[in-house]
Image (tube, rainbow, N blue to C red):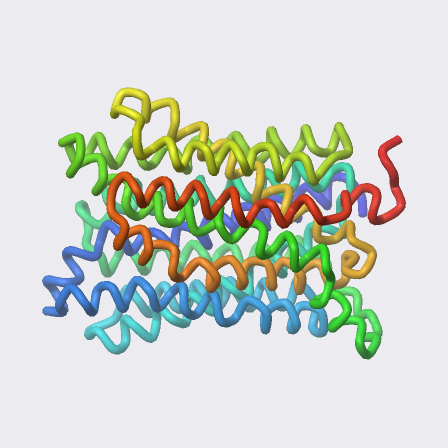
């Protein structure tokens, strides 16, 4: 594919990734108003929040299977269409059951988009370009998360939650149409019986999937509990605590592309999961003892490093010969599903342990599971490229 065309495809996928994430996070600023308008209790708000993760977690692997059979463009575009229509459904919901259903369907749409969209990109770039591209892909998650939390809070206040959520869906529909124009049609490849099972049973994919569960759970738990911790323990004002917590996302915007490109140039993937990964584990543990003024440095370091880990994780999948480009979407779907569902109990244990033991627990789990990554093959060696 000519250079200009592939960068248009990249622009389409990355912009969709931003809007995918906006529609993940933009309901958060609206939750207090939704609770009041729909007259629902706190438990229902928790259920509403978890409904997205339930849909996204359960449908990761089916999305990968569908992508390998029907094609990554078809599957990712279906995901964006489902997500966008569900976001509109959220905005027009007159009651809790419809809102809950729309939120669950939005999670399914997100699952159908996430890994197949990576499958759109991997054939367009060489293995020593994938780290940078996956870094950009990860960075767009953080751009979208920031917009969803901050820009949409403003929109909810200026307009109302109905209009704000509908707007996110409409923008998504526009990007679906753009993607239909610029993303090339899927190349139909004859499916080989058993090859899909080989990809799912890949020792390397299994080790990476479970090796990074601790980091995934630690980062998710930190994003949920850090503002509360800063307020309760150090009496940090709510706005300032939220800003400190948001630095995880904003620092990650740089971490993914920088770490991914460095991994490409040095032709190393494994070390770029291990060293930043242990840095994240140490950082999570240090939250328990660091004073508030040091959080301004510690939190962005954690965000920068965790973005490197996830970018390299996604870039590695297609380099293993048992996976390749055809089953990269399926392998990444398995990784994401394992990490979402496998982290379910981490915030529960954290809450039971309290402070500061909970932070030590997060750091310990992240470091302990990461030990599994020592046993993977270096992806650049696994596909026969070597290090030269």
Point out residue 170 in the picture as x, y percentages from the top left corner: 40, 58
Is residue 100 depicted above or below 385 in this figure? below
Image quarter for residue 374?
top right
Point out residue 281 in the picture as x, y percentages from the top left corner: 47, 38
Image quarter for residue 269?
top right
Taking the spot 12% from the left edge, 64% from the top edge, the residue there is 37
Q: Quadrant of the C terminus?
A: top right
Point out residue 221 in the picture as x, y percentages from the top left corner: 35, 49
- Residue 229 appears in view: yes
Is residue 374 depicted above or below 289 in this figure? below
- Residue 126 appears in view: no
Residue 270 is left or right of residue 298, and the answer is: right
Is residue 67 depicted above or below 375 in this figure? below
Taking the spot 17% from the left edge, 61% from the top edge, the residue there is 34
Residue 327 is left or right of residue 134, and the answer is: right
Taking the spot 33% from the left edge, 65% from the top edge, the residue there is 50
Taking the spot 26% from the left edge, 54% from the top edge, the residue there is 352
């Amino acid at each position: 594919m000519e250079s200009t065309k592939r960068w248009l495809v990249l622009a389409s996928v990355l912009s969709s990734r931003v809007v995918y994430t906006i529609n993940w996070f933009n309901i958060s600023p609206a939750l207090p108003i939704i609770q009041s308008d729909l007259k629902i209790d706190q438990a229902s708000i928790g259920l509403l929040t978890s409904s997205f993760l339930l849909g996204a977690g359960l449908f990761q692997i089916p999305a990968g299977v569908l992508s390998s059979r029907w094609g990554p463009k078809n599957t990712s575009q279906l995901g964006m269409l489902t997500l966008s229509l569900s976001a509109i459904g959220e905005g027009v919901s007159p009651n809790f059951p419809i809102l809950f259903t729309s939120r669950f369907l939005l999670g399914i749409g997100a699952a159908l988009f996430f890994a197949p969209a990576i499958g759109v990109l991997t054939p367009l770039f060489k293995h020593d370009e994938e780290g940078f591209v996956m870094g950009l892909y990860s960075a767009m998650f953080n751009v979208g998360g920031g917009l969803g939390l901050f820009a949409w809070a403003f929109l909810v206040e200026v307009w109302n939650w109905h209009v704000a959520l509908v707007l996110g869906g409409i923008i998504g529909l526009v990007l679906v149409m753009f993607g239909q124009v610029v993303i090339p049609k899927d190349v139909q490849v004859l499916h080989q019986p058993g090859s899909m099972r080989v990809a799912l049973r890949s020792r390397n994919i299994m080790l990476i999937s479970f090796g990074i569960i601790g980091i995934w759970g630690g980062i998710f738990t930190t994003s949920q509990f850090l503002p509360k911790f800063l307020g309760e323990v150090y009496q940090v004002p709510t706005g300032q605590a939220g800003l400190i917590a948001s630095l995880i996302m904003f620092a990650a915007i740089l971490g993914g592309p920088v770490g991914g490109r460095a991994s490409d140039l040095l032709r190393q993937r494994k070390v770029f999961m291990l060293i930043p990964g242990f840095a994240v584990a140490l950082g999570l543990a240090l939250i328990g003892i660091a004073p508030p003024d040091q959080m301004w440095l510690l939190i962005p370091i954690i965000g920068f490093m965790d973005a490197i880990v996830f970018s390299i994780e996604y870039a590695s999948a297609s380099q293993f010969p048992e996976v390749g480009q055809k089953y990269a979407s399926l392998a990444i779907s398995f990784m994401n599903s394992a990490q979402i569902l496998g982290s379910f109990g981490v915030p529960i244990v954290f809450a039971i342990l309290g402070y500061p033991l909970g932070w030590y627990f997060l750091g310990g789990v992240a470091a302990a599971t990461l030990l599994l990554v020592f046993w993977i093959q270096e992806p650049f060696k696994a596909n026969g490229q070597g290090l030269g």
